Image (cartoon, helix red, strand yellow):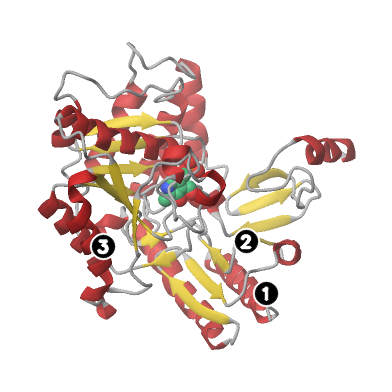
Amino acid sequence: MADGRCFEREHVWHPYASMLDPPECWPVQSADGVRLRLEDGRELIDGMASWWSAIHGYNVPELNAAIKRQTQDMAHVMFGGLSHQPATNLARKLLEITPNSMEHVFFADSGSVAVEIAIKMALQHWQARGERKKTRLLALRHGYHGDTFGAMGVCDPVSGMHHLFSGMLPEHLFADAPPNGTDDDWDEAYISGFQRLMAAHHDEMAAVILEPVVQGAGGMRIYAPEFLRGVRALCDAYGVLLIVDEIATGFGRTGKLFACEHAGISPDIMCVGKALTGGYMTLAAVLTTRTVCGGIHADGNVLMHGPTFMANPLACSVALASIELLLDSPWQENVAAIESRLQRELAPCRAMPQVTDVRVLGAMGVIELNHPVDMALVQPMFVEKGVWIRPFGRLIYIMPPYVIPSDDLSCLTHAMREVVAIQR
Ligand SMILES: Cc1ncc(COP(=O)(O)O)c(C=O)c1O
């Protein structure tokens, strides 16, 4: 095992990490329920749901069975010229549960690729209709949409990766995101910058892209649904498509099945991923309306995308099983119970001088500090406390599986409070 550990440190890359001086990594042997079992026998309560995806926890009998069943029929077949029930059934289910205007589904292999496809749909829609000037996107500061080139181009231009690839990313437009808050503290001024950009640039704009209500990896920010309603109205008024990136927020995380339901709006293009398969396999989907689909085909062209593993049957089967498991569960009550426990148990941190904000929505709790977290120090501390919580920047946050028992959730919030208390 020691040899394996050495080999991994020297040869295996981890996300956003140095390969020359790799940070510590904890090998996981298995995972069950809300617990990750490490190779050294320790168990950690999972606060991250494997980056928003494992909403039912791990080793879920219904999901295991779906994969096993599907393996007996076929693990994969190409989607060009062939089709299969797992894809058809999943598409039907997705159209049932997403806003009514969604009519067509394109399967992608990850969230970032879904964003690429959504952008391509918007661009092809206008190009095919002869609107050749409409090539830019309007995104929000603090936004995060993935790590591929098209997606990086619409991530926050400062905290994102623009500085590493300047001159190589498309030149899009960025509006200020609204501040953290709810409809109760909404002020029309919060959308005025966005409105000005729309007024000035709509004729060259193909689409607006944003994360609805929660901006995830760009700062774990939670903003008023009223902003979304305003954006929808402006997109309609100026003839600009609205792409809603529900990759992190989808499938119940914010207390609604999809976050755009908080605002009662319907997008033109919608991306889902992450929790789509309950964290079992990589799969994403891009949904769109009859109008956008018609636009794409207006000049006789077709959507120019076709990944090798498009609509992988194993992934589609487990996704359908995960959605059914979610819808058959009391997920709203579970998420609401997590929300009120997080509100209650994180509230004391508000009084700490090193804390600038505490934010909770659905099954997501965030403590923002006034300085960046020292990961080399804090990460092993959480492991010592028997929890898996992975901070970034100034944020210590959790988004646990919805099935987390209340005492396990309290262990997570207790560890958060203890670690925050010693941050000076
Ligand atoms: C809102 C949002 N969009 C897109 C992505 C990219 O998804 P993936 O990591 O599956 O490529 C993420 C991932 O964190 C995300 O949070």
Residue nearest the viewer, comparing 287 with 370: 370
Residue 195 picture quarter: bottom left
Percent x, y of residue 194: 26, 62
Q: Amino acid at mark 2?
A: Ile
Q: Amino acid at mark 1?
A: Val
Question: Which residue sits at x=54%, y=52%?
Answer: 49
Find the residue positioned furthest to the top: 81
The tag earlier along the polypeptide, 2 or 3, is 3
- The 10 Å Cα crowd at callout 2, few under 14, some 14 to 19, many 20 or more, is many
Q: Are marks 3 and 1 in contact (CB under 8 Å)?
A: no
Residue nearest the viewer, comparing 245 with 134: 134
Q: Amino acid at mark 3?
A: Phe
210 relative to 106, above or below = below
Percent x, y of residue 350: 52, 84
Whole-Å distance between the Cαs marked 1 and 2?
11 Å
| Left or right of 344 in this view: 238 | left
Judge: label 2 CB < 8 Å from ligand 1: no
Whole-Å distance between the Cαs marked 3 and 1?
38 Å
Badge number at residue 194: 3
Percent x, y of residue 300: 17, 18
Secondary structure of the residue carrying tag 3 is helix
The residue indicated by pointer 2 is 389
